[in-house]
Image (tube, helix red, strand yellow):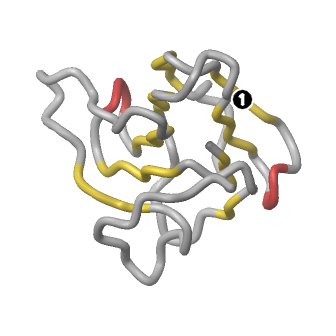
Amino acid sequence: MRKALLVSISAAALGAAALVTAAPASAAPTCPRGFACFYTGDAGTGRVLITQSETWQNLNGLDGVRSIFNNQAADDDACVASGLNGTGQRFCVDGGTIAQVPSFLTVRSLRG
């Protein structure tokens, strides 16, 4: 069973993930090994949601996901979707990858 890192979570955010502030833009994004990190800003900036859940999680109160750092094994992808519970358009990245979410995709759910 996969687990989520619980650090400092707001009631409006996800129940199985952590929401913290990311490093400044000048620093490389950080993400604990074995987890997927979803950032509200480009290139790993802004607030970050840290998870390790294979179950789709709906976003409530998080200002959109703009970038992903998947710091999991190469064969373990992390995905975002435009609909609730993983429906609609999806964008996935393999483990060990940092990527920008396409600008046309408004993220409503994710899984790591």
Which residue corresponds to the image point at 44% horizontal and 83% vertical from the top-left?
11
Residue 9 vertical placement versus 72 (above, below)? below
Q: Quadrant of the N terminus?
A: bottom right
Query: In the figure, is residue 82 to the left or right of 69?
Result: right
Which residue corresponds to the image point at 49% horizontal and 31% vertical from the top-left?
68
Residue 56 vertical placement versus 112 (above, below)? below
User: Residue 51 appears at what percent x and percent y?
Assistant: 51, 51
Which residue corresponds to the image point at 28% horizontal and 57% vertical from the top-left?
20
Q: Residue furthest right?
A: 87
The amino acid type found where label 1 is placed reads: Phe
Query: In the figure, is residue 22 to the left or right of 50?
Result: left
Q: Residue furthest bottom?
A: 11
Q: Residues within 10 Å of mark 1 (few under 14, many from 20)?
A: some
Which residue corresponds to the image point at 67% horizontal and 27% vertical from the top-left?
76
Q: Residue furthest front?
A: 1
Q: Quadrant of the C terminus?
A: top right
User: Residue 105 appears at what percent x and percent y?
Assistant: 68, 36
Residue 44 vertical placement versus 50 (above, below)? above
In this figure, which residue is indicated by the disc labeled 1?
Answer: 91
Residue 109 vertical placement versus 23 (above, below)? below
User: Residue 63 appears at what percent x and percent y?
Assistant: 45, 57
Q: State which quadrant residue 31 falls in.
A: top left
Element type at mark 1: strand
